[in-house]
Amino acid sequence: MEGGTTCAPCRGRRQARERETYSSRRQAGLCVRCGTASTFDGAAMCTVCGVLEAESGRQERKNAAARRRYRELRSAGRCTTCGAASQGASRCVPCARKSYELSAHFRGIPDWEPEYTVVDLMTMEEHGPFGAEEEAAACIAFLKLPRERFEIVAERHPMAHFTGA
């Protein structure tokens, strides 16, 4: 009960129930907070609960607690991820390796779809970007540009030439 109002076993049971409620509501597409309203565009909360959550200041308190925990672990020479001894580094060797392997630097340049931009050669005005070449062609038709007055610039992934993308 140290620093709280419930004992550890009761708190553990309550947290397990809350996790189960959260996951069942999330899977059903309901608001995870009130459980009555449906959510929009994959959000976890309905609009009303989202506004209430934002105004509560909970995220700021959570961030402050995380920063405090980080400072305490760092000053004690512990890993800021798992709490193990870290010989003065911010992370122990296993956590540092895992963090590096999950980083974008380790995984390389992400693949992306090509984008197309229509350039008016007279004014050098750019129209776009468009996600498909057909959309760029529609833009040209809409602008009624003659063939000698425009250029379609395709921006592709730097490795697309080598990977066939």
Image (cartoon, rainbow, N blue to C red):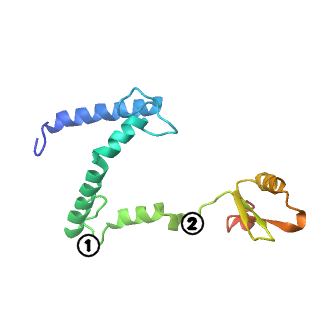
**Amino acid marked by disc 1:** Gln
- Viewport quadrant of the N terminus: top left
Which structural element holds mark 2? loop
The residue that appears at 37% across and 41% down in the rendered structure is: 51
Asked if residue 114 is positioned above or below residue 38 in the image, the reply reads below
Could you say which quadrant of the image residue 118 lies in? Answer: bottom right
Asked if residue 112 is positioned above or below residue 27 in the image, the reply reads below
In the picture, measured across the screen, residue 162 lies left or right of residue 33, that is right
Residue in front for this viewpoint, 84 or 126: 126
Residue in front for this viewpoint, 31 or 28: 31
Q: Which residue is mark 1?
A: 87
Q: Residues within 10 Å of mark 2 (few under 14, many from 20)?
A: few
Residue in front for this viewpoint, 107 or 135: 135
Which structural element holds mark 1? loop
**Amino acid marked by disc 2:** Gly
The residue that appears at 22% across and 60% down in the rendered structure is: 68
Q: Which residue is mark 2?
A: 108
The residue that appears at 20% across and 64% down in the rendered structure is: 72
Furthest-top residue in view?
36
